[in-house]
Image (tube, helix red, strand yellow):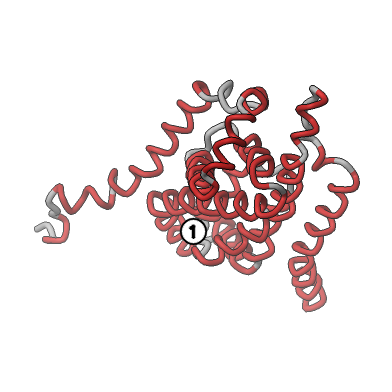
Amino acid sequence: MRDKADHHPPSEVAPGGWMRRLPLIVILIVAGVGAFTLRDTLTFDMLRDNREALLAFRDAHYAATVALFMLAYVVIVAFSLPGATIATLTGGFLFATFPGALINITAATIGATLIFLAARWGLGERLAAKMETGQGTVKRIKDGIDENQWSMLFLIRLVPAVPFFVANLVPALVGVPLNRFVISTFLGIIPGGVVYTSVGAGLGQVFERGETPNLGIIFEPQILLPLLGLCLLALLPILIKALRRGKAV
C-alpha cells in the first residue's frame, strides 16, 4: 500500500519542480537571446556617438540618470547580457571615478546577487544537500570548499580570467550563504571595478583624440601585479591550513 505522502496535487509539486527552476531558466534564455541580439548594441561606438546626449541628460536629471543607469547595469549583470564592460566605462564617463566606481560596484553586486539567488533556489540548495550527504570525492570537495569559503570567494572575484557569470553561479551550487556571497562580491570586485571606472572617467580625452580605450589595462604589470598580490593573500589561509595538515600527518 502506497504511503499518503507519495500523493501530491499538481499545485504542491510545481513549486519544487519547474516553478523553482523558472527564474534560472528565464535568465538562461534571456542570456542566450541577448548574446546574439545585443552583442553589437552595447559597444564603445554607441557610447561615443551618444556621449553628448548622455551628458546633457545627466546634467539635467542627475538622480534619474543614476537610478536608470544602475537599473540597466543590474539587468545586464543579472541576465548575463553582453556589454558589462561598456556599462562600467559608461559609469566612469558619466559619474567620474568616484562616485562612478561605487555606483558600478553596487549595481554589479545587486545583479550578481539576483542570479545567485535564482541559481540557488532552482538548483543550488538541492545540489549542495546532495553533496553534503554524499560520500568519497564529492564529499571531500564540498568539505574543502566549506573550509575555505571566504578565500575561494575572494579568489574567483580577483582572478581576471574567471568569468563573472561563472563566479556568480558556482557559489550558489555549493551552498554558500547569501551574506557571505554579497560581502565577498562587493569587496572582491572593487579592484577591477575601480580600474575600469577610471578608464571610463578618462573617455572624454580618448574621444577627442579619436582613439579607443585600453581595455587590456588590467593585464598590464602595474595593475596585474597588485591583483596577483591580492590573490596570494586570498590563498594564504588555504596554504596555512594545508601546511598544518602536512605537519600533523
Q: Left of 14 or right of it: where is 56?
A: right
Looking at the rendered image, the quarter that the C terminus falls into is bottom right
Across and down, in percent, residue 14 comes to 22, 48
Q: Residue at x 46, y 51 (%)?
A: 114
Q: Residue 95 or 9: which is nearer the viewer?
A: 95
Question: Where is 134 relative to 206, above or below?
Answer: below
Quadrant in the rendering for residue 106: bottom right
Q: Is residue 153 visible?
A: yes
Q: Is residue 169 visible?
A: no
Quadrant in the rendering for residue 94: top right
**Residue projecting furthest to the left:** 1
* Helix, strand or loop status at disc 1: helix
Q: Residue at x 82, y 25 (%)?
A: 209
**Residue projecting furthest to the bottom:** 248
Question: Where is 132 relative to 62, above or below?
Answer: below
The residue labelled by disc 1 is 131
Q: Residue at x 48, y 52 (%)?
A: 116
